[in-house]
């Protein structure tokens, strides 16, 4: 999924303003900083549909009250088929149900994929090409109309047309790989069959063991054809989850959600409906969110932040016991890399030397310190199922091993072009990288590219960049959603590449293909962790840079919430108002 | 409020005694008026003559009580109809202003409010002293406009000052100042900003209005020609002091003070060769902060008796001229010398004009 | 008067036309790809990029895009073609590249916020400026006068983004006397509208009032020395009548005209206030749009700001003619 660009830019800018005074962070990550798990246990897949309904109560939770969400700017989309950014997905968790869904563990345990509208995570036949879903009884839209398999089939089809342009591309790619289907209102995409109102059969042309994950994307949110008002759906949408819109939504400043009385908890293994009302306030920026939630007055006692605590206030929050209790912190889903263009830097030793020479701690300090950036040495995010913590190019203090780098270079002084987006923030980061690499003898030239053309430029196979900053957030908890997308050489095309290290090793491609086809998702997760380490050790195509850290506050009267591993926001569906 | 303060049966309507006015400024104390006395009866016109900075305008502003009391020190007496206005509170003197005494100014354009119609400004002047309806005041204002010779007064009433010609504006000013039948009218350079032909019309108007209303008029000017036309008495001021005082005949036909001679010589002659006749007074008016010692005119005086003489040491007193009742002059020069010099050197120049006009 | 109005209106249209053209050109002079921006932090498949480019009409020649845009403003238009076409009724300012929302809706949302802020603040700055400046001029050299001079100096060197957060910290979070600055429609709840905007009003108003205090003081001192004020006193008017009916009436004229222009300029540039107080007005939309290269919103907000200034100029000229009878419109 996409990380919120604006939030990232804003916070990065603010970070750059106040780095001084942050405690030096060591590998152990003690102190106020968030820390990631050393390994992420594999995911739990509820194939048999044994998860209880209604969802077990959150301990101590009580109904009533009003909770609120503070965000700098409204999400770009709340039309479910257009949702691809984490903020809208968090809000969507209250509004929309999907074919399958995740139960997040407040204790940091593995994610659990369960049937949501469906009774289980899907039954595959045809060695993973065909997936059959049976719908639960008693599922309804907010107006009381029953949800049928046709509504879901239409939702998926809709995600492949104009009103899904901004959403995830998977169904379009996987159901219609040759782009034969042209969506129009009411049309159902090929491969989607609804033998009856309770059954949906999805037939992919290829094997897709990850289909249960795809079914959890908002693409599968049911839409009755009659309510499809096109663009207007962004503001005038139909809820299937525990909350529904109250009044009109201006798409700019605020949104109010109230209980959806036609949502039946007995049909839902994931969600709760504790607060009477949710107010989404899309006006406060990072500073204002920090100020308001720290002040903890009135309605803000029930508020959750979405931007990290303002840089200047982080030490105060870390050192104040009362505030520390109200923090939501940890590692987000987004990983920042320096990709090394393997078609230009062909010598593995040079790439390894870059990894040794890189000064990760200096970079993290430049980004804003340990609360908002955690050292990453693996390619996968620590939130990914199967994540394995390792460091292929260790250094004693996190500042790089210059001696080792020099040894690998054997007296060479390779010239490198470092590409970064031309913003004040990245200009600063670029200098940190340049200084670190030049310690080992590299000659680094900076090439600052226009911000808006950056990804187009580096995604062009003929790019002249040797090293480039890149970031990734996985769309679903299957390692293929990172590893295959970024390092499977089979997907390299002329333009628009995500594999910007342009790594193309037949041996690795084969292993990644196997990962993609592995029917056992738990096994796939484990394979991912192993492959991650193998890629870094054997090919060194990237320098893992840092994992984005989450450091939020919630008001004193918010109970039950925790850091959502899926969206890197506060979990909303377990939250309640403590009164 | 509708009656004007009654003047005592006898004696002058305006009686100024030993008026002294000082302003404190950043540069020092300005002695704007330094011991001036004069009287004026109803129906009579007093011309106060002098260059700018001589104290003539300050004197008239003092009579009107228009000085800022915070920055002005005043002493002496100004009796208007028997009341010493220097002793009156601001509110009481305000009630006299515009009612018992009124004033018209040099530049009628800048003296009228640009954003209000002529009519409104005149009505305002009437209603501040008369508790009457707007309509009544309006009727009266139009009558006054008519009276001062403004054609189509009804239409003119609605117009703004910028829509009037200079002479018409001054007529409107006069209408405004006379609307409350003041007993004393102070006209401060009323014709300076106007064409010569219009000047004469305005002066004629003032004269005929004076006959009609029997008011006392103070006419402040630097132009002896104007004085000659309308004044009964003349007061010549220099450096804040009265230097010559008498009736028009005395001051204009038998001037005794070299400064007055200078003024007379600077009047362009209608009959002679104007270029040859015009003799301006040399030098500049004195600074009122640092007056020259002795006779303040002595640095510019051709006849000054210096080198131990009295002119640069003693301030001359204002004393009667021998043989001329009521003619006072402040000059150290011997009586006979002055009379001879006037006859021999001055009488041919500007006086000729003045004399003819007087006659 | 009518001729004046027609001429000014034509001039205004010409100005706005020039601004619209230059904004359009500037936008395309930037070597950037709005479609790539829309894809966020990663790379869109090329087919999607093409589709978006086509839907937005960005594959048309520049002149066609411009004429289509202007046509939309007056008579509405259809954006894109085929099954993805969108009807956009007049006044069509296009759709946001980012969210697909009609720009007209965004402006309609933001405008009341910006107008409320600026007009409310203008009331504050005119009131403070006129009262303080006039009082200072009438008591020249007194304690109040000295205070007013200090106030103008202090105000002129104060910034919204400094004063604003301080006021919020004190009155909202410290003393708790006021709610957080928020916008509520005055039609829904006038009291909430006023209390929600009082801090922006005071902040923007106080800072601007420094200028107006100085201006009022200077104007008042100047008019107090005018001949017609002396005339008014000579007429026997009371001090109050002289000061207010005569002196202030004349002093206020240039202030009103400057205030008119200032309101126009502030409406076009209210962004700092909106950002400081997290109010979602037109200015904040404009800045976000510029960051996102969201041309339709940039165009609309730039044109709107220009319209404000042009209209303010015309209004001020007409106002001037009304309050100063010497001025003739021709």
Image (cartoon, coloured by chain):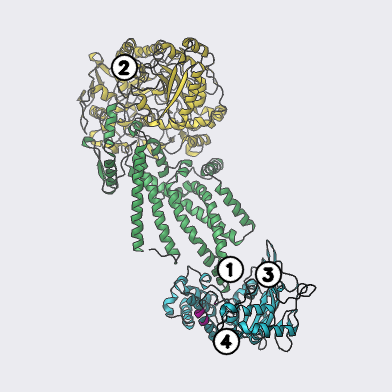
Q: Which residue lies under the disc numbered 3?
A: B286
**Mark 3 or mark 4, which is nearer the start of the sequence?**
3
Q: Which residue lies under the disc numbered 2?
A: A47
Classify mark 4: helix, strand or loop.
helix
Q: Nearer the viewer, residue A149 or C64?
A: C64
Task: Say whether residue B193 is magenta.
Answer: yes
Q: Which chain is cyan?
A: B
Classify mark 3: helix, strand or loop.
loop
Q: Which residue lies under the disc numbered 4?
A: B357
Where residue A552 sits in the image (x, y, percent)?
A: 48, 29
Looking at the rendering, the stretch of residues picked out in magenta corresponds to B186-200
Task: Say whether residue A495 is magenta.
Answer: no
Colour of the chain lettered C: green
Q: Is label 1 or label 2 in front?
A: 1
Classify mark 2: helix, strand or loop.
loop
Residue C245 to residue A207: above or below? below
Given the image, what chain letter belongs to the residue carrying mark 4?
A: B
Given the image, what chain letter belongs to the residue carrying mark 3?
A: B
């Amino acid at each position: 999924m996409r990380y919120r660009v604006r939030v990232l830019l804003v916070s990065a800018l603010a970070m750059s303003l106040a780095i001084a005074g942050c405690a030096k962070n060591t590998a152990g990550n003690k102190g106020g900083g968030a820390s990631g798990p050393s390994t992420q246990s594999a995911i739990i897949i509820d194939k048999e549909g044994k998860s209880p309904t209604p969802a077990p109560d959150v301990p101590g939770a009580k109904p009533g009250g009003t909770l609120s969400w503070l965000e700098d700017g409204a999400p770009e989309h709340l039309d479910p088929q257009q949702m691809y950014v984490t903020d809208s997905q968090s809000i969507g968790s209250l509004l929309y149900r999907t074919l399958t869904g995740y139960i997040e563990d407040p204790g940091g345990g593995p994610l659990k994929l369960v049937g949501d509208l469906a009774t289980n995570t899907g039954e595959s036949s045809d060695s993973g090409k065909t997936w059959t879903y049976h719908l639960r009884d008693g599922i309804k839209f907010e107006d009381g109309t029953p949800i049928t398999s046709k509504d879901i089939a239409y939702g998926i089809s809709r995600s492949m047309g104009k009103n899904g342009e901004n959403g995830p591309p998977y169904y379009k790619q996987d159901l219609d790989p040759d782009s034969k289907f042209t969506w129009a209102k009411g049309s159902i995409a090929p491969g989607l069959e609804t033998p009856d109102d309770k059954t949906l059969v999805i037939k992919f042309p290829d094997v897709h063991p990850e289909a249960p994950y795809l079914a959890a994307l908002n693409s599968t949110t049911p839409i009755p054809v009659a309510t499809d008002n096109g663009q207007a759906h962004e503001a005038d949408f139909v809820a299937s989850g525990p909350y529904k819109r109250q009044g009109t939504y201006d798409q700019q400043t605020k949104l109010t959600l109230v209980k959806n009385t036609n949502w039946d908890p007995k049909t839902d293994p994931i969600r709760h409906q504790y607060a009477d009302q949710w107010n989404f306030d899309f006006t406060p920026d990072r500073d204002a969110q920090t100020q308001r939630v720290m002040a903890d007055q009135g309605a803000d006692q029930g508020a959750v932040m979405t931007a990290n605590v303002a840089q200047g206030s982080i030490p105060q929050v870390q050192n104040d016991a009362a505030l520390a209790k109200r923090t939501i912190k940890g590692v987000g889903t987004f990983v920042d890399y320096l990709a090394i263009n393997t078609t230009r830097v062909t010598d593995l030793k040079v790439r390894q030397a870059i990894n040794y020479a890189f000064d990760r701690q200096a970079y993290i300090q430049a980004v804003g310190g340990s609360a908002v950036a955690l050292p990453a040495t693996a390619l996968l995010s620590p939130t990914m199922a199967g994540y394995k913590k390792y460091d292929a190019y260790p250094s004693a203090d996190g500042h790089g091993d210059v001696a080792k780098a020099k040894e690998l270079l054997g007296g060479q002084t390779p010239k490198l072009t470092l590409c970064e987006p031309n913003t004040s923030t990245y200009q600063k980061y670029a200098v940190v990288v340049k200084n670190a690499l030049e310690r080992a003898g590299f000659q680094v030239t900076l090439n600052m590219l226009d911000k808006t053309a950056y990804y187009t430029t580096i995604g062009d196979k003929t790019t002249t960049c040797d090293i480039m900053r890149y970031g990734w957030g996985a769309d679903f908890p299957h390692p293929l959603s990172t590893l295959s997308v970024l390092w499977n050489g089979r997907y390299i095309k002329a333009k628009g590449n995500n594999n910007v290290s342009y790594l193309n090793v037949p041996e690795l491609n084969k292993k990644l293909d196997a990962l993609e086809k592995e029917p056992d998702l738990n096994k796939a997760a484990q394979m991912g962790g192993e492959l991650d380490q193998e890629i870094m050790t054997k090919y060194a195509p990237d320098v893992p840079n840092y994992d984005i850290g989450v450091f939020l506050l919630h008001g004193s009267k918010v109970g039950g919430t925790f850091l959502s591993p899926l969206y890197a926001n506060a979990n909303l569906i377990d939250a309640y108002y403590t009164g | 409020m509708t009656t004007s303060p009654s003047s005592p049966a006898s004696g002058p309507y305006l009686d100024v005694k030993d008026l002294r006015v000082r302003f404190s400024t950043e540069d020092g104390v300005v002695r704007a008026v330094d011991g001036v006395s004069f009287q004026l009866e109803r129906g009579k016109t007093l011309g106060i003559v002098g260059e700018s900075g001589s104290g003539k305008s300050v004197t008239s502003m003092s009579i009107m009580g228009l000085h800022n009391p915070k920055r002005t020190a005043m002493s002496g007496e100004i009796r208007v109809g028997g009341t010493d206005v220097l002793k009156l509170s601001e509110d009481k003197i305000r009630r006299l202003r515009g009612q018992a005494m009124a004033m018209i100014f040099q530049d009628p354009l800048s003296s009228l409010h640009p954003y209000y119609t002529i009519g409104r400004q005149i009505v305002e002047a009437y209603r501040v002293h008369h508790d009457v309806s707007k309509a009544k005041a309006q009727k009266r204002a139009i009558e006054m406009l008519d009276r001062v010779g403004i054609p189509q007064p009804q239409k003119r009433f609605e117009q703004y000052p910028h829509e009037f010609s200079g002479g018409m504006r001054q007529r409107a000013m006069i209408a405004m100042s006379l609307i409350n039948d003041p007993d004393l009218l102070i006209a401060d350079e009323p014709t300076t900003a106007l064409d010569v032909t219009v000047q004469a019309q305005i002066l004629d108007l003032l004269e005929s209005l004076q006959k009609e209303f029997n008011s006392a008029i103070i006419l402040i000017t630097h132009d002896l020609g104007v004085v000659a036309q309308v004044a009964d008495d003349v007061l010549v001021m220099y450096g804040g002091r009265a230097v010559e005082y008498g009736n028009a005949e005395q001051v204009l036909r038998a001037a005794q003070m070299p400064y007055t001679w200078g003024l007379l010589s600077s009047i362009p002659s209608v009959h002679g060769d104007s270029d040859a006749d015009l003799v301006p007074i040399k030098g500049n008016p004195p600074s009122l902060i640092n007056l020259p010692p002795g006779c303040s005119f002595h640095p510019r005086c051709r006849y000054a008796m210096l080198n131990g003489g009295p002119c640069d040491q003693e301030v001359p007193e204002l004393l009667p001229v021998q043989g001329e009742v009521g003619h006072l002059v402040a000059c150290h020069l011997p009586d006979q010398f002055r009379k001879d010099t006037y006859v021999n050197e001055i009488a041919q120049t500007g006086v000729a004009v003045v004399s003819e006009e007087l006659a | 008067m009518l001729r004046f109005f027609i001429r000014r209106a034509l001039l205004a249209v010409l100005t706005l036309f020039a601004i619209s053209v230059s904004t359009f050109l500037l936008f395309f002079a930037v070597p950037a790809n709005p479609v790539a921006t829309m894809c966020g932090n990663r790379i869109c498949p090329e087919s999607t990029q093409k589709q978006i480019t086509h839907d937005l009409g960005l594959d048309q020649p520049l002149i066609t895009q411009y004429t289509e845009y202007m046509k939309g403003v007056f008579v509405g238009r259809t954006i894109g073609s085929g099954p993805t076409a969108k009807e956009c009724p007049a006044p069509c300012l296009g759709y946001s590249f980012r969210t697909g929302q009609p720009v007209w809706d965004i402006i309609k949302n933001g405008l009341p916020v910006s107008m409320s802020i600026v007009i409310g603040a203008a009331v504050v700055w005119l009131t403070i400026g006129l009262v303080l400046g006039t009082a200072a001029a009438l008591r020249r050299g007194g304690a109040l006068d000295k205070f007013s001079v200090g106030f103008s100096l202090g105000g002129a060197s104060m910034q919204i983004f400094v004063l604003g957060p301080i006021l919020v910290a004190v009155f909202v979070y410290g003393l708790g006397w006021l709610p957080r600055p928020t916008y509520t429609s005055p039609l829904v709840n006038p009291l909430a509208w006023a209390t929600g905007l009082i801090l922006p009003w005071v902040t923007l108003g106080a800072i601007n009032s420094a200028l107006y205090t100085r201006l009022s003081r200077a104007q008042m001192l100047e008019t107090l020395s005018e001949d017609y004020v002396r005339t008014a006193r000579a007429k026997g008017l009371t001090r109050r009548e002289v000061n207010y009916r005569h002196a202030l009436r004349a002093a206020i004229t240039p202030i009103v005209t400057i205030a008119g222009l200032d309101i126009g300029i502030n409406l076009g540039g209210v962004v700092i206030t909106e950002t400081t107080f997290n109010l979602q007005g037109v200015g904040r939309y404009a800045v976000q749009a510029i960051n996102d290269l969201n041309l339709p919103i940039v165009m609309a907000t730039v044109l709107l700001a220009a319209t404000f200034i042009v209209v303010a100029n015309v209004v001020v000229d007409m106002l001037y003619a009304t309050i100063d009878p010497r001025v003739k419109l021709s």
